[in-house]
Image (spheres, rainbow, N blue to C red):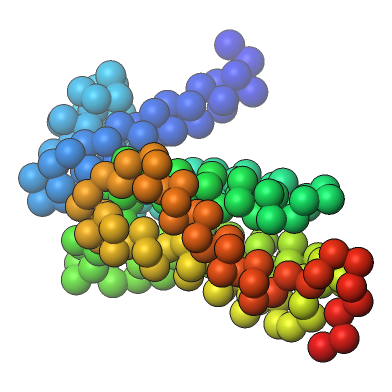
Amino acid sequence: MTQAKAGRGRIDKREAILDAAFTVFARRGYNQACVQEIADEADVAKPTVYNHLTDKETLFREAVEAAADAVGAQCLDAIERLRDPGADLPAALTDSARRLLRVCASEHARALRSLTYAQLAAFPDLVDSVQSRTSRRVAEALGDRFARLMLAGRLRTTDPAGAAEQFLALLTGPLESRSRLGARKVPAAELRALADSAVDTFVRAYATPVGAPDLT
């Protein structure tokens, strides 16, 4: 086996362990989960887990951060259409909003929030780490998209970061309420209605009329 393949195999095994760890922690909680169960889930020997991640605390932290990276990447993909929204900006915003809510309401994202807040006392810095990988990362990217749309006269000229914050709040605020802070699975039709309502409010506040200059 070449050195490159060996390195790739080690990375793949580490990723499999982190995926398995997140699954077990989400199912059992931090205190009830054991390393042997994680090893069984990953289909590796228990010493292999320790070879890659030194202890249960490190395993939990890195599993949660890896899950946050995955959720953040899905959210970024959801707003990719806003790079080039085409002629129908409300349609592009609606598509992105619906996709964002599907990601945020997914079982993976709900488990991530639940685990992070359940272990707030033991891992007080983990909330900030998760938010930097998810909500703040998405807000920054969305602010960049909105800045470009403002320069193009498609949105009212204002603080793009503030507009991004408002857009996300219109989505996540009602989602948190409807999902009872993640305890309830929100039906797809309800998610679409939340997205459509958020976009309608946002467009009324920020969009410029087609063909009209933004004089603010």
Q: Quadrant of residue 178?
A: bottom left
| Quadrant of image for the N terminus | top right
- Which x, y percent locates residue 13? 42, 26
Residue at 36% over, 34% down: 19
| Quadrant of image for the C terminus | bottom right
- Which x, y percent locates residue 193? 44, 51
Side of 215 relative to 142 (left or right): right
Say above or below: 199 vs 88: below
Residue at 74% over, 83% down: 158
Q: Quadrant of residue 49?
A: top left
- Which x, y percent locates residue 133? 51, 58
Nearer the observer, 12 or 194: 194
Nearer the observer, 101 or 73: 101
Hey, which residue is sitting farthest bottom in the picture? 216
- Please say whether residue 140 is visible from this viewpoint: no
Residue at 73% over, 70% down: 207
Nearer the observer, 111 or 39: 111
Hey, which residue is sitting farthest left in the picture? 32
- Please say whether residue 212 is visible from this viewpoint: yes
Residue at 13% over, 41% down: 28
- Which x, y percent locates residue 187? 32, 41
Nearer the observer, 170 or 147: 170
